[in-house]
Image: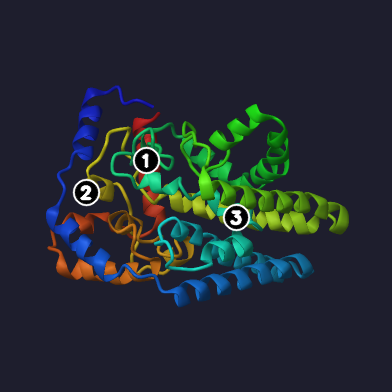
Amino acid sequence: MTVHDPILAAAQRARAAIPDDTAMLRAAAELARDYALANPRIYWTDLLASALVGWSALAGAILVDNVAIALTCGLVSMLALYRAASFIHELTHVRKGALPGFRLGWNLLVGLPLMIPSFMYEGVHTQHHARTRYGTADDPEYLPLALMKPWSLPLFILVAALAPIGLILRFGLLTPLSLLVPALRRKVVAEFSALSINPAYRRRAPEGDFARQWAAQEAGACVVALALVGSVFAFGWKPLLVYMAVHSAMTVINQLRTLVAHLWENEGEAMTVTAQYLDSVNVPPPGTLPALWAPVGLRYHALHHLLPSVPYHALGKAHARLMDTLDMDSPYRKGNYAGMMPLVGKIARSTMTRGA
């Protein structure tokens, strides 16, 4: 979508060019040094506990006949697996060597069983953080959702709900077929191998060690997809349908979180770091629900754009320190919001007034 109204276009350019706030950036740089170390014990304990609870609850949802108990198990499974899956975000930022074996462990416990291997995000998400890419047409994780048509938001959520079907087709059908058809393989790599929201984004073919990791992870996800289809013949439809319902609910929650991770008001202009921060969202305490729908540090998404190398378990401390040290009129405070619903309403109203 292009803004044709010259007044709106001028306002957008002004937002993108907001001068950087030196006090905020200086304080963030100091925090990046103070909170740079990832704690392996926290990472492994959190991941293992989340995966154990998630898969155990999923088994309960499949095996228990009592509907109320099965639904409760399904809800617990969704929240726990969502938390475990969210560590894919940490994999893209953690410093090399800081968490030995964590990438392999995450893929075996979560990524492959959910058909979201880490290669789908690694090498993609970091482009979202590139200073000159954020909010532009080259950003794989950005769309001007607040400036689009009103029907774009329901479609955005519906696509997420269908994700389990899409992933089974991607890995169970396209992976083996693309190995036989080079032209299809190029298309699969470019267009169907990234967890992105920008439909125009095209991915380059992997090289070196990453290509070997990609191949191994894709093969594993292919085996899982085929096993899920085959499970219908061995165990009937219930296990697959319960798995897909939990997976779908988890993906919808993540899509709703994505919907409120930014204000989505930029339309292609390169933005200053402060402008990028103000286009992003923190949902800090005292609210408690964001810990469920924005786990593993994702409730501090705006702060994360200032401190992408800081591990998730240190973001709360970094946020508190910034709130204590920065002036009351600092732009940092303008990135803090109360919860999901006000933000969803804000974006919805924007689409109805400017995108209709």
| Mark-to-mark CA distance, 2 and 3 | 34 Å
Mark identifier at residue 293:
none
Q: Which residue is at 39% across, 44% downward?
A: 127
* Left or right, 120 with reference to 7: right
Image quarter in which the C terminus is found: top left
For badge 2, the amino acid type reads Thr
Closest to the observer: 185 or 226?
Answer: 185
Q: Is residue 285 visible?
A: no
Going by the numbered disc 3, the residue's amino acid type is: Ala
Q: Quadrant of residue 187?
A: top right
Q: Which mark is residue 349?
A: 1
Q: Circle 1: is it few (<14), some (14-19), or many (20+) Cα within 10 Å? A: some
Which residue ends up furthest to the right in the rendered image? 233
As measured in the structure, the alpha-carbon distance from the residue carrying label 1 to the one carrying label 2 is: 25 Å
Can residue 205 be seen at all in this image of the molecule?
yes
Which of label 1 and label 3 is nearer to you?
A: 3
Q: Are marks 1 and 3 in contact (CB under 8 Å)?
A: no
Seen in the picture, residue 301 relative to 129 is either above or below; the reply is: below
| Residue with the mark numbered 2 | 274
**Residue 189 percent coordinates (x, y):** 57, 37
Q: Pointer 3: what residue?
A: 249
- Spatial CA distance of label 1 from label 3 is 25 Å
Percent from the top left, x then y, of residue 29?
21, 61
**Circle nearer the N terminus (2, 3):** 3
> Are circles 2 and 3 on residues that touch, CB within 8 Å?
no
* Tag in front: 1 or 2: 2
Nearer to the camera, 52 or 280: 52
Name the side, left or right, on which 173 lies relative to 48.
right
Along the line of sight, the residue nearer the viewer: 259 or 86: 86
